[in-house]
Image: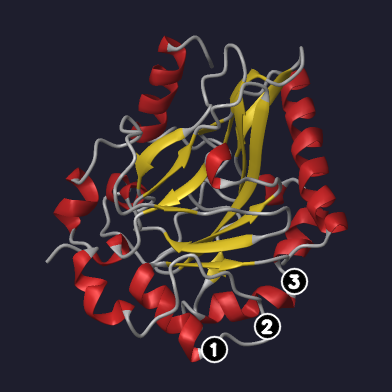
């Protein structure tokens, strides 16, 4: 059965898809049922303005350091650079950020996030040094940008390239800018985390397809908001049609199963090599 339509019988007893929650010391049964059914949660104001600045300062410090040092990848995971809103080059995607910022790592290990970790189980961990680690993203709609948005994908594909069955993985995104539906931003296909392997691999062309889906949900965020979504859920980042805009966010993977540690000499996996090739065609690096 289609994962979207399989939730129809439960929708009447659940809150609306665009419900925004408050993160408390424990998640309610209603919130857990919402996540299990739709594959995501949206919390308002989890970070203070000062904590948002910790993340954006980390982004600026690391991107400047790695640009100055000519670093193109960290532990085999490419860094995306390209034109920013001004004259200087900026980072579009910085992997393993918490490994290089004690302040950021301490923030992410704060007890306020324990209710989220409890959703996965007792053995859950933050993948600070696994796969792509903690990632700070930037989407820029400016001349020459090769990353104004991001096409449809699931994060479960990474497990397939690591030759293992997709594991349950909760990603939480800390949003650093105000983004309305008209300004692009996160789009989700609720319920698709329940799909089978074939649907995960072939429902849409990975990263190529940007076409809106009739069942997609636009997630509107304020600075400091947090979204939680199952990594197996189909999602994309819609482009802000207004030139001279950016959207920044930080994504942290909550992991289960056998760790896949990225070492200093790790080689890029296939999907990273494919992504690098695609960016170079567009004139990026």
Residue at the location (21% across, 47% down)?
201
Above or below for 180 versus 125: above
Disc 1: CA contacts within 10 A as few (<14), some (14-19) or many (>=20)? few
Please give the residue where the numbered disc 1 appears in the rendered image.
28
Q: CA distance from mark 2 to mark 1?
A: 9 Å
Please give the residue where the numbered disc 3 appears in the rendered image.
110
- Dots 2, 1 in contact, CB < 8 A: yes
In the image shown, does 275 or 250 lie closer to the viewer? 250
The x and y percentages for residue 45 are 73, 65
Q: CA distance from mark 3 to mark 2?
A: 13 Å
In the image shown, does 278 or 95 lie closer to the viewer? 278
Residue at the location (31% across, 65% down)?
191
Quadrant containing the C terminus in the rendered view: top right
- Left-right relation of 250 to 18: right
Above or below for 34 versus 181: below
Residue at the location (52% across, 26% down)?
147
Badge 3 marks a residue whose secondary structure is loop
Please give the residue where the numbered disc 2 appears in the rendered image.
24
Residue at the location (32% across, 35% down)?
211
- Quadrant for residue 50, please give it: bottom right
> Mark 3 or 2 closer to N-term?
2
In the image shown, does 262 or 270 lie closer to the viewer? 270
- Quadrant for residue 6, please give it: bottom left
- Left-right relation of 62 to 160: right
Residue lying furthest right:
50
Badge 2 marks a residue whose secondary structure is loop
The x and y percentages for residue 134 are 61, 50
Badge 1 marks a residue whose secondary structure is loop
Disc 3: CA contacts within 10 A as few (<14), some (14-19) or many (>=20)? few
């Amino acid at each position: 059965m289609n994962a979207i339509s399989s939730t129809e019988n439960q929708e009447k007893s659940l809150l609306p898809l665009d419900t925004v929650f408050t993160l408390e010391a424990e998640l309610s049964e209603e919130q857990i049922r919402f996540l299990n059914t739709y594959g995501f949660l949206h919390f308002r104001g989890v970070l203070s303005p000062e904590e948002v600045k910790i993340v954006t300062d980390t982004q600026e410090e690391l991107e400047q350091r790695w640009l100055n040092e000519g670093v193109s990848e960290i532990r085999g995971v490419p860094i995306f650079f390209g034109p920013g809103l001004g004259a200087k080059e900026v980072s579009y995607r910085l992997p393993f950020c918490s490994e290089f910022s004690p302040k950021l790592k301490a923030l992410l290990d704060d007890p306020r996030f324990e209710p989220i970790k409890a959703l996965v189980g007792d053995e859950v961990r933050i993948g600070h040094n696994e796969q792509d680690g903690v990632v700070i993203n930037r989407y820029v709609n400016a001349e020459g940008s090769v990353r104004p948005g991001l096409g449809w994908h699931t994060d479960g594909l990474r497990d397939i390239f690591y030759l293992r069955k997709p594991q349950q993985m909760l990603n939480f995104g800390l949003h650093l800018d105000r983004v309305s539906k008209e300004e692009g931003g996160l789009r989700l296909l609720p319920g698709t985390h329940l799909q089978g392997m074939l649907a995960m691999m072939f429902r849409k062309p990975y990263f190529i397809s940007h076409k809106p889906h009739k069942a997609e949900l636009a997630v509107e965020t304020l600075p400091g908001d947090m979204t939680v979504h199952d990594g197996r859920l189909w999602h994309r980042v819609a482009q802000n049609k207004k030139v001279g805009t950016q959207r920044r966010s930080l994504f942290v993977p909550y992991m289960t199963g056998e760790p896949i540690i990225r070492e200093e000499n790790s080689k890029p996996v296939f999907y990273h090599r494919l992504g690098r090739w695609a960016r170079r065609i567009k004139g990026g690096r």
